[in-house]
Image (cartoon, rainbow, N blue to C red):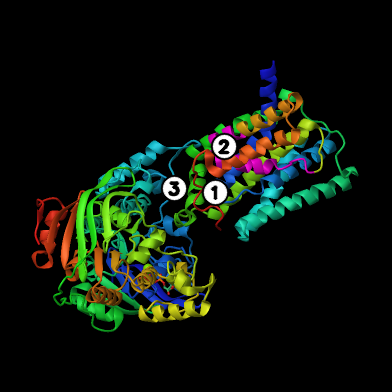
Amino acid sequence: MMLLLFLWQTLRIAAPYLLAAAGGVVAERAGVVSLTLESFLLSGAFGAVAASHWGQSAWIGVLGGLGAGLFFGALHALATVRFKADQIVSGVALNLLAVGLTRFLLQMGFDSSSNSPRVPGFEGLGHPLLWLGLLIMPVLAWTLAHTRYGLRLRAVGEHPQAAESLGISVAKVRWVAVLASGGLAGLGGAFLSLDQHQFTDQMSAGRGFIALAAVISGRWQPMRAGVACLLFAAAETLQIQLQAAAAIPTQFLAMIPYALTLIAVAGVVGRSRPPAALGRA
Amino acid sequence: MTTLAIQMTGIDKRFAAVQANRGASLEVAKGEIHALMGENGAGKSTLVKILAGLQPPDAGQFFVDGREVTGWTTPQALTAGVAMVHQHFMLVPTLTVAENVVLGREPTHGLRLDRQAAVQAVRDLCQSSGLQVDPNRLVADLSVGEAQRVEILKVLYRGAQVLLLDEPTAVLSPPEVAELWGVLRRLQQGGATIVLISHKLDEVMAISQRVTVMRQGQTVQVLDTAQTTAAELARAMVGRDVDLDVQRPENQAGKPLLRVTQLQVQGSRGQPALLGLDLTIHAGEILGIAGVEGNGQSELLDALAGLRPYQGSIKLADQELATLSLSQRTQAGLAHVPEDRHQRALILDYSVADNLILGKLAEFSRRGVLDQRAIAAHAAELIAEYDIRPTDPQVPVRGLSGGNQQKVVLARELSRSFKVLLAAQPTRGVDVGAIEFIHARLRQARAQGKGVLLVSSELREILTLSDRIAVLYRGRIVAMLPRAQASESVLGAYMTGAAQAVTHG
Ligand SMILES: Nc1ncnc2c1ncn2[C@@H]1O[C@H](COP(=O)(O)OP(=O)(O)OP(=O)(O)O)[C@@H](O)[C@H]1O
Ligand SMILES: [Mg+2]
């Protein structure tokens, strides 16, 4: 029973990580830095609740989360692909924008500075995005390895000039990748808010960065990144359960998942090489 | 009159301050092998890139097969059968040979990439062209010669009828060049039209029917190969006589400077690449290393330069190098012109001035602050001395033509105070005028009592410069000959393993 509970809680924590990390893998393998995952998660969470509230349906909420993620993805693509702005600067700016914008809309739409009213959501294992989260990494791995678009995406992330010289539009491949990244992470955000039936201010709480850490410690490979997401989620679950049981100070326990992330990214998992064109216009 | 496969007139192209093409023209008949020559920075690469749709011209018109195609894009050029092999490889190192070849025109089976079809297509092309590469290998693991084959397979896969080859032989060894000529002739018989950029006069004389010569962005002359000579071509290019076969005054070699004993090095795939090599370079000596690429040259250079672990001993003026860092080696008196300028010698996004002081920072800073005035003066001096174009020291090296990038590396390394220079392919991609100049500088270093290790795929270069010549074959020195006993045929026999190991002198 303990074990089942542990597994269930781990999956629930992992789902948004998995969806966001999948988005991170797609964008970074195409050569676009994914510091924006946090903004995709947050805007997706808000979009889902707003749409669910408006349509009184959790499924419409899913569409809302997807739409909000796509919107922020489009902003990032516009800045970095179309106007060749610095990818890190654009990422940080969008993260700040997402915090401000969701807070503003929360106030305007729901007349609250902390949380939305309760909206239709999903219950436990009936959450469709949980299952999407579990399936996404294998699907992504297959797509990258075995489809035309996957091959082109990898080429664009490693050597954009070579791809361009073969008539492949680097801009088009990157647009699709960044949009997909926004959509996937937006769904990750929708998982969060629909699971809790409400939006709370800054509810993404750094999950986008943990997802990015999973991408990096997973060496930009979907399956490895997925395993990293599950490990981070398991550490978090353990921390929560220990908090209830043990006499260790909670502040110390709360640190564990982040410390683990830091250690993983610092290379204990093994030296990793990012896509060669990552971060370059 | 035969139809023209390519007709370009009045092409202008400007990059910021540099006018790369000014009213340039090019006419190539159908089925012709046409050479495009000219000094470094003359605008050759720019002209063919415009033709391949990679860059739009500022002005001018061009036609392919009589159809006006001015301002077309790469996909349009590829569809029309115009494809380019670039001066710097355009391959994705993390993909396999087959994936690189089919990229952009992939065979699919439903949603799925049809890998088997891709591999089969490459096998078929290898068969019909005579170029051998394993389609399943990762491009990162290929030698430059093999990478060049992949570039050509890419062009063939697209069924190109007009092939633009930008210095395809710069990185090839003589047998590989011969193989390439075979492929080009076969393509020509099949009706293809070929534009070949090269700095090598003998190659142009051997393979082309006509030659277009460019200077400072303009087309200055079109010659029939059969009615011209190498000397005339050189004159047309640089505007004066060039003599590349200057006989060197005899030199008295001095005391040993660099002593290599029992050197063992592993290659990048962990295979043994050097199997206990002994070598001595004396003061006032140029030691040439001949050999087909992939017989241990890269590993030897890397080990000497401190870029690869090794077993055995390397002593520079009696100082063991094994424990020295790269900067300590430079300090001990080692200068290095590496094989791969992009990977190892230049920071492409840094300016010419900044690239010229790499590894000399101590000389150009005071209490940790860069002395910009001294850096500018240093750059101005070297740019003038080595005729680097454009002359602006602030342009990023990425914007320089291939030959001018090479001159930046040479200028930096030769202007160090060194005892021994490791010169790998020092004249790769530079024009005849610059070759003459660089050879003179290498001889000058020798006259000053320095030692030079010259690794070159050009046997002519080795024969004109070296005092002694070592032939590397399968990780061993199979012959060590004084210049007087070496010739292209003698070296060739050792290089291919046809002759057995001997050591003279
Ligand atoms: N992308 C670029 N940005 C800025 N300047 C450029 C760029 N490409 C070429 N140039 C400049 O245009 C001029 C012509 O360059 P190009 O590469 O066509 O010369 P090239 O004849 O091919 O020379 P080489 O024999 O050395 O390869 C050079 O002065 C070069 O610095
Ligand atoms: Mg060129």
Chain letter of disc 2 in the image: A
Res. A30 mark: 1
Work out whether residue A216 can be spotted.
yes
User: Which chain hosts label 3?
Assistant: B
Residue B166 located left or right of residue A11: left
Q: Residue furthest front?
A: B318
Pick the front one: B233 or B170:
B170
Type of amino acid under label 2: Ala
* Image quadrant occupied by the C terminus of chain B: bottom left
Q: Is residue A88 above or below residue A233?
A: below
Q: From the viewer's perspective, is the residue at label 3 or at label 2 nearer?
A: 2
Say which mark, if any, is on residue A225. 2
User: Which residues fall within the magenta stretch?
Assistant: A202-229
Main SS class of the magenta portion in the image? helix
User: Which of the two residues, B487 or B16, is positioned nearer the viewer here?
Assistant: B487
Does the magenta-highlighted stretch encompass residue B420? no
Q: Are marks 3 and 1 on the same chain?
A: no
Residue drawn 38% across and 62% down?
Answer: B328
**Residue of label 3:** B105
Q: CA distance from mark 3 to mark 2?
A: 30 Å
Locate residue B42, reporting x and y percent: 37, 75
